[in-house]
Image (cartoon, coloured by chain):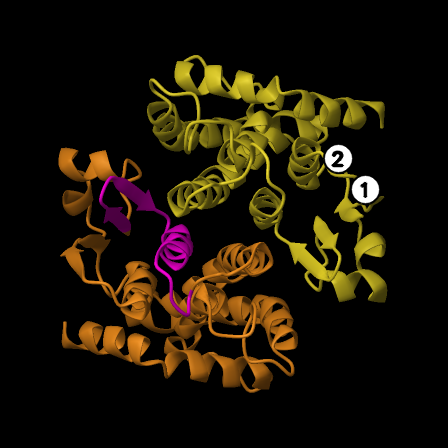
Chain colours: A orange, B yellow
Amino acid sequence: MLQLYGNSKSRAMRCLWMLEEVGRPYQLVEKTTRADDLQTAEYLRLNPNARIPTLVDGDLVLWESMAVNLYLAQKYDGPMHCTSPEVLGLAAQWSFWAMLEVEHLLLNLLEHRALLAEFARDASAAERNELLLKKPLGVLNDALAGCDYLAGNGFTVADLNVASILVWGKMARLDFSAYPNLTRWLNACLARPAFVRVREQARRK
Amino acid sequence: MLQLYGNSKSRAMRCLWMLEEVGRPYQLVEKTTRADDLQTAEYLRLNPNARIPTLVDGDLVLWESMAVNLYLAQKYDGPMHCTSPEVLGLAAQWSFWAMLEVEHLLLNLLEHRALLAEFARDASAAERNELLLKKPLGVLNDALAGCDYLAGNGFTVADLNVASILVWGKMARLDFSAYPNLTRWLNACLARPAFVRVREQARRK
């Protein structure tokens, strides 16, 4: 059975979403980001970076959440599968783009709007991140003009990987009003039953 | 014909290396990272991020250097091709890992050892980056214990993408002596005729 090490309130969330989309039986092995959870000889053998998530699928051990999802999409046929090198290339492009152009800004915004203790939040850091996000969010909004998906003619791992980062914008009370295409697309992604199931699991924690 | 926008002294180098490995005819459209080169209506239509590289292959326009290489590997059969979802997953894993765990540290080290004007270099910044690089370089060195390649049984896009970042360590006079497996693997990667051709082109500039 597929095993995912991580938890639903971490970057592992995006792999849980993918696993729910794929529909194969899987086991979530709960791991926090705490050092005493990750710095064990047993876990370091699986992931020497001491990070989550890690996927174990038979003999294959895979880390990096985006790569885990690209693998699951190609391994297990279904609507997530990239059926051509072109769609796979675009899925990889958007996944790298989201990690390199968006994730750190959005995570820092989320920290200063919600994750940090109130006294430790810095409003000017939040403002700075919101300003810097205008460029990549504009790129994404323009890419979604007149189309519903980032790669190919249906929902793929490209949409899932990017939406799994953009959802933080909702939690960070980011003003999405200047990005109507992005908003329409993000709401459609987050309405998928597979995502709703993962979110419900996280809320019950 | 395949067209790559960029130049051989930028991240586009790794795509040029890949194109040389693939062996199909291609054209390099010279683009610097200067704003007046990238902020044109014509180029922004191809790459709204105003970055290099960008690949144009018929109707497909692709950015993000790592994704361009994963695409080229899958599109054009040859030794680079990831023949299974497992090998593709590992190639994606190592590509994300190298971008997220290594690239910024190594680039910053390179800046303070070589790229910046002498008076602007900060020896303590270089020292800090070298210290922080110990963890990921150790992970890579351990992964290469007793094997010659990062994914599958031959040289793939996984090796190319990671080596295209690690080569900066040579330029930055990084001390590789603690990483013998990494050193052996990197030297083998950089001895490939495709890489040597790209390096020679860059030197003639």
| Residue B34 % position (x, y) | 80, 49
Q: Which residue range is magenta in the image?
A: A54-80
x 54%, y 16%: residue: B187
Q: Amino acid at mark 2?
A: Ser
Q: Residues within 10 Å of mark 1 (few under 14, many from 20)?
A: some
Q: Is residue B179 something that shows in the picture?
A: no
Residue type at mark 1 is Leu
Of residues B133 and A116, which is closer to you in this image?
Answer: B133
Quarter of the rendering occupied by the C terminus of chain A = bottom left
| Residue that label 1 marks | B28
Task: Tell me if residue B105 comes above or below residue A135 in the rendering.
Answer: above
Lower sequence index among marks 2 and 1: 2
Depth check: B129 or A142 in front? A142
Task: Kindly indicate the quadrant of the structure image that contains residue A40.
Answer: top left
Task: Residue under label 2, please give it.
Answer: B8
Residue A7 percent across, percent down from the top left: 21, 60
Q: Residue at x 50, y 75 (%)?
A: A154
Mark 2 surroundings: few (<14), some (14-19) or many (≥20) residues within 10 A: many
Q: Can you see residue A82?
A: yes
